[in-house]
Image (cartoon, helix red, strand yellow):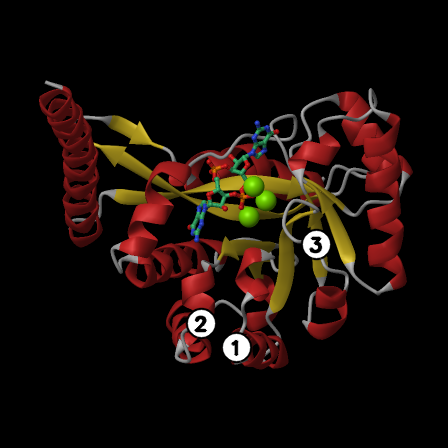
Amino acid sequence: EAKREGRNKYRLFADELSLKAQARRSLELDLRHALAHDQLSVYYQPQVDPRSSTFEGAEALVRWFHPERGSIAPIDFIAIAEEAGLIAKLGEFVLREACREAANWPEATRIAVNLSPIQLRDRQLPNIVRAILNQTGLPAERLELEVTESALLHDDGVTYSNLHTLQACGIRIALDDFGTGYSSLSYLRRFPFSKIKIDRSFVSQVPHDADSMAIVETVITLAHRLGMTVTAEGVETHAQLHFAALKDCQQAQGYLVGKPMDAEELRLQFLEEKQLKVGT
Ligand code: C2E
Ligand code: MG
Ligand code: MG
Ligand code: MG
């Protein structure tokens, strides 16, 4: 009797597992299809100088509008893309699309693109990036690549050499989600970062939590002392924007400034207006 019960329990568990595995497998197939049939798109989230409100550039964020499931968030498919061996293709798509779009923006602006740790471990990465810059005509100085600490953790040297090669081409490297990973300050010395992006989890606590405010302020100072610029991520309130400006943080990004939007919307809201301002 007990044996049978155990078996039934096992079967239930196995069924549940295979359901999960099936769902995942079907999402993977859909993603493969989406990549092959241009069903992914790139959204852009503006980055401004909090002191002057000047538009400085945008971060490219991939979007997937599934024909049946609707919009699927990157957290729900980036990991699948990584495990299924699709991230290189996805990453190239976003990079090409974003560079092509940003090539039409004003000269002083920049486009930031996220890189997966897997892309960073590919020895071909610098060649791929250079080829895309050539194809799209975007100057290297206007491209910023965002990496997270998790990409640096188990580096066997390829990531290190890729980042130095890319930096030597004039491309900027930003350290994303700073403070959430295994934050080792030695990364700031070892890798050629031009920018630190302070994670939203700290910024969102301003001005209610004194410790978070101290951390944000200290990271800004640290970045400046190391000759880097800083972006405050996830700015949602005027108090947060004012705090960033007050502490001389050069960039703010977040829903208060603008949510991620399609290229057309960004042009309408930030670029045409900017050109008007410059012209008048
Ligand atoms: P991330 O690079 O840190 O991007 C910022 C995320 O925070 C975006 O989520 C953005 O929509 C969200 N965000 C920005 N401002 C606010 C705010 O004020 N409040 C709140 N609540 N959220 C805000 P998204 O687009 O869902 O992307 C999530 C993550 O997925 C990204 O985090 C990045 O790690 C990854 N990701 C997105 N696109 C790509 C891509 O093309 N390639 C790779 N490898 N990863 C990507
Ligand atoms: Mg990012
Ligand atoms: Mg981030
Ligand atoms: Mg994040």
Tell me how far mark 3 sits from mark 2, CA to CA.
20 Å
Tell me how far mark 1 sits from mark 2, CA to CA.
9 Å
**Tags 1 and 3 touching, CB below 8 Å:** no
| Residue 6: image location, x then y, percent | 16, 25
- The structure residue drawn at horizontal position 53% and vertical position 73%, both measured from the top left corner, is 159
Query: Mark 3 or mark 2, which is nearer to you?
Result: 3
Mark 3 lies on residue: 183
Query: Mark 1 or mark 2, which is nearer to you?
Result: 1
Q: Of label 3 and label 2, which has the lower sequence position?
A: 2
Q: Amino acid at mark 2?
A: Arg
Q: Amino acid at mark 3?
A: Ser
Mark 2 lies on residue: 121
Mark 1 lies on residue: 156
Residue sticking out furthest to the front: 1
The residue carrying pointer 2 sits among few (fewer than 14), some (14 to 19) or many (20 or more) residues within 10 Å by Cα, namely some
- The structure residue drawn at horizontal position 71% and vertical position 58%, both measured from the top left corner, is 195
Which quarter of the image is occupied by the N terminus? top left
**Tags 3 and 2 touching, CB below 8 Å:** no
**Tags 1 and 2 touching, CB below 8 Å:** yes
